[in-house]
Image (spheres, rainbow, N blue to C red):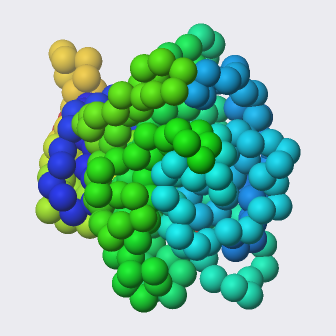
């Protein structure tokens, strides 16, 4: 199995480990329906209930974090792309106008990026902003994110980005999946960087209340003294954290991308007649995708068997499934040419030995019927087997 990360439509492809697990490979008899079950291995964020422009909090960082020489354990969220340590003073503040770095409007605040999001009048919302502490001490991270947040005056333009605080190093990471353009509001101006007060801050050139757009960009800010940070671009790698209702699934057959699309749910039932590889894809905010593959190795069902054979495996007619529980609610029935049932089992490890209630069945062609129940779906597979005496 392999896990691939793809960001949006930028054709950025990086081999990484485990945010989606398609499961272990399966070996099964041809045509036997089996259930594939994907698993998301990342985190679901804690939803932040906010109203347009108003700072909310405080929320726990989860560890001690140093910012411009001061240590904090709590933070506040500003819906317009702001994470602030100025607690409690900044709670309840509503602001959406021009703000350059440095400024006295947002002291002790990360602007990542600051732009006017959401619209008024609106009820408090909890579907776009989230936070989560990931990892274990002494290497935890606080992830605060905006997932497909609609831009003010451009409700069809959706911004997705994260501000991440790292324990121990006190690094600040800023992952921007997409910051689209919105010239209908403040000429698309936004600000990205770290603000301390009216005299001190670190700003990204060309992004100090200026017009810019970004896709698939990650940046780190490293402390370089009590009043300064060094910053550089790093490979795009947002944290695998997402609001619970913003995770979608897709399954593909044969290849990825470009394979046949089979379904859009966490679970999928397949019944391949030949060895086939399937790909599970999850999509996080604004098209961040992770994939993993699983191969179903197919063994042909025997078309004949001989109960007196010198070879043990040829003495019964049975299906094969490994692991054996993959066919869910399995049953197999054998019928003679008059339609009479001569054998039935619900175990994949039990085969037909050519008898009916202890009586030897004559040689000839018999019909086998396999039934598999997966959730509300019932699947039937039929075929023929010759009993040789």
Give x and y (percent) for residue 183.
37, 84
Q: Residue at x 61, y 21 (%)?
A: 69
Report whether 86 appears left or right of 226.
right
Q: Residue at x 42, y 28 (%)?
A: 229
Front residue of this view, candidates 112 and 70: 70
Q: Is residue 339 among the parts visible in the rendering?
A: no
Give x and y (percent) for residue 217.
30, 48
Q: Work out whether 183 lies above or below 40.
A: below
Front residue of this view, candidates 65 and 190: 190
Report whether 5 appears left or right of 144.
left
Front residue of this view, candidates 224 and 66: 224
Q: Residue at x 15, y 55 (%)?
A: 11
| Residue farthest front in this picture | 199
Q: Residue at x 85, y 45 (%)?
A: 88
Give x and y (percent) for residue 377.
52, 66
Q: Quadrant of residue 72?
A: top right
Report whether 351 appears left or right of 259.
right
Front residue of this view, candidates 199 and 99: 199
Q: Is residue 138 among the parts visible in the rendering?
A: yes
């Amino acid at each position: 199995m392999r896990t691939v990360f793809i960001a949006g439509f930028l054709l950025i492809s990086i081999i990484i480990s485990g945010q989606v697990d398609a499961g272990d490979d399966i070996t099964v008899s041809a045509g036997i329906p089996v259930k594939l079950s994907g698993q998301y291995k990342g985190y679901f964020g804690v939803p932040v209930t906010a109203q347009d422009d108003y700072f909310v909090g405080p929320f726990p960082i989860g560890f001690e974090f140093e910012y411009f020489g001061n240590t904090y354990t709590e933070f506040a969220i500003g819906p317009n792309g702001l994470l602030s340590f100025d607690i409690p003073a900044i709670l309840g503040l509503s602001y959406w106008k021009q703000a350059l770095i440095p400024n006295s409007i947002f002291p002790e605040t990360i602007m990542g990026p600051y732009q006017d999001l959401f619209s008024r009048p609106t009820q408090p919302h909890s579907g776009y902003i989230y936070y989560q502490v990931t990892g274990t001490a002494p290497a935890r991270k606080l992830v605060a994110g905006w997932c497909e947040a609609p831009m003010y005056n451009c409700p069809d333009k959706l911004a997705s980005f994260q501000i991440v605080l790292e324990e121990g190093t006190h690094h600040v990471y800023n992952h921007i999946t997409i910051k689209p353009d919105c010239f209908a509001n403040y000429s698309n101006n936004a600000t990205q960087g770290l603000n301390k007060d009216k005299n001190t801050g670190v700003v990204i050139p060309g992004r100090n209340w200026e017009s810019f757009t970004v896709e698939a960009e990650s940046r780190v800010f490293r402390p370089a003294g009590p009043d300064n940070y060094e910053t550089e671009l790093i490979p795009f790698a947002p944290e695998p954290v997402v609001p619970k209702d913003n995770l979608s699934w897709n399954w593909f057959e044969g290849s990825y991308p470009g394979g046949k699309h089979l379904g859009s749910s966490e679970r999928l039932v397949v019944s391949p007649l030949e060895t086939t590889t399937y790909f599970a894809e999850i999509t996080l905010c604004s098209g961040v995708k992770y994939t993993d593959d699983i191969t179903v190795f197919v063994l042909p069902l025997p078309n004949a068997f001989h109960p007196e054979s010198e070879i043990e495996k040829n003495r019964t007619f049975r299906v094969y499934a490994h692991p054996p529980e993959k066919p869910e609610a399995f049953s197999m029935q054998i019928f003679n040419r008059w339609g009479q049932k001569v054998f039935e089992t619900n175990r994949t490890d039990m085969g037909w030995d050519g008898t009916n209630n202890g009586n030897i069945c004559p040689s000839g062609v018999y019909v086998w019927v396999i039934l598999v129940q997966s959730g509300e779906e019932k699947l039937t597979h039929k075929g023929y087997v010759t009993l040789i005496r």
